[in-house]
Amino acid sequence: MKLLLSGRALTAAAVAVTTLVTGGSAAGAVSAPAHPAAAAAPDISLTNVKAHLAQLQSIATANGGNRAHGRAGYQASLDYVKAKLDAAGFTTRVQRFTASGRTGYNLIADWPGGDANQIVMAGSHLDSVTSGPGINDNGSGSSAVLETALAVARSGYQPGKHLRFAWWGAEELGLVGSRAYVNSLGSAERAKISGYLNFDMIGSPNPGYFVYDDDPTIERTFKDYFAGLGIATEIETEGDGRSDHAPFKNAGVPVGGLFSGADYRKTSAQAAKWGGTVGQPFDRCYHSSCDTTANIDDTALDHNSDAIAYAVWELSQ
């Protein structure tokens, strides 16, 4: 999740965009009969999500300790995610932009099939800050979205709506990558997106369970999932407008998402609901070098990963 916009971030947001189509094709898609309208989402493997986090940690460690925009660690992170999606049969493309004098990249992955006039998107930012590896912020969201996409492929899911997944660059400079993507779409293309789901920091070590209160249908979908687990949720306010849903929302696209907390401190009432430590930040390693694989709460990551899949299945029927 980005810091509140500074002058540096605002000047970084001058963007020039081109699109490169690379790898992956419909021909490689898993072939399976259409699922019934009430197809149930699969359980997302925490082991698999954490394996992706371990890879992102290894990438950061090998590249100066971070996976930031314009750095080798970001390129290696994108290459890792793209290779997984290409092998699973997604049609992928890399969108290039510039920010702060460096080239940045978004990764877009389409699952073949579904109504192209009704697109459900799920996305997360893939970049870290320069000061750390960014495993909770935002390896957690990126890995859970990746594993959800791979679950779509493994199940041969054929939804009524078209599914698209995205990993954004330069979020930490001011939502640059996601804004570049939204700005690259004409009004007719934007109108085809029936919902964009955003996942930024979903494994915080002192976690809360926060749901965006933007589109009512998307909000209710997430709340229903957590209610089924007996977990109380709260409306997300800490990151409102500070992550990649904002450009979509500003363009009139229905948005929603999940969040487990950053540097706000957990109240006694929140600890009574969720456990954890009163008076401590939800993520004490927010934007720091200690945001490593040790900075993840497995239970929060597991619940939120399953909630992503639940919403993707429910909203794309």
Image (cartoon, rainbow, N blue to C red):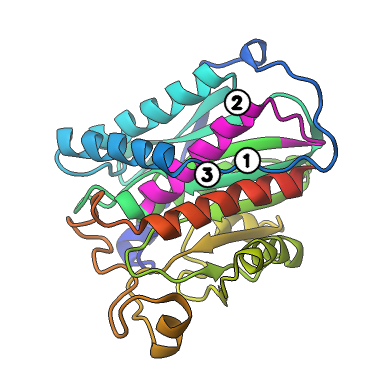
Quadrant of res 157: top right
Specify whether residue 181 is painted magenta.
Answer: no
Q: Position of residue 99 (x, y in %)?
A: 37, 44
Position of 296 with respect to 230 (left or right) is: left
Specify whether residue 141 is painted magenta.
Answer: yes
Q: Secondary structure at mark 3?
A: helix
What is the number of the mark on residue 180? Answer: 3
At 51% across and 25% down in the image, what residue appears? 85
N-term mark: 3 or 1: 1
Q: Does 194 sit above or below residue 299?
A: above
Position of 63 with respect to 210 (left or right) is: left
Q: Main secondary structure of the magenta part?
A: helix
Cα distance, mark 2 to mark 3? 31 Å
Q: Nearer the viewer, residue 16 or 45?
A: 45
Q: Nearer the viewer, residue 296 or 83?
A: 296
> What segment is highlighted magenta in the picture?
138-162
Q: Position of residue 46 (x, y in %)?
A: 44, 44
Position of 218 with respect to 232 (left or right) is: right
Q: Does 231 sit above or below residue 271?
A: above
Q: Residues within 10 Å of mark 2 (few under 14, many from 20)?
A: some
Q: Secondary structure at mark 2?
A: helix
User: Which amino acid type corresponds to the residue marked 1 in the rendered image?
Assistant: Pro
Q: Nearer the viewer, residue 81 or 153?
A: 153
N-term mark: 1 or 2: 1
Q: Position of residue 263 (x, y in %)?
A: 32, 73
Mark 1 touching mark 2, by CB under 8 A? yes
Q: Which residue is mark 2?
A: 154
Quadrant of res 235: bottom right
Q: Nearer the viewer, mark 2 or mark 3?
A: 2
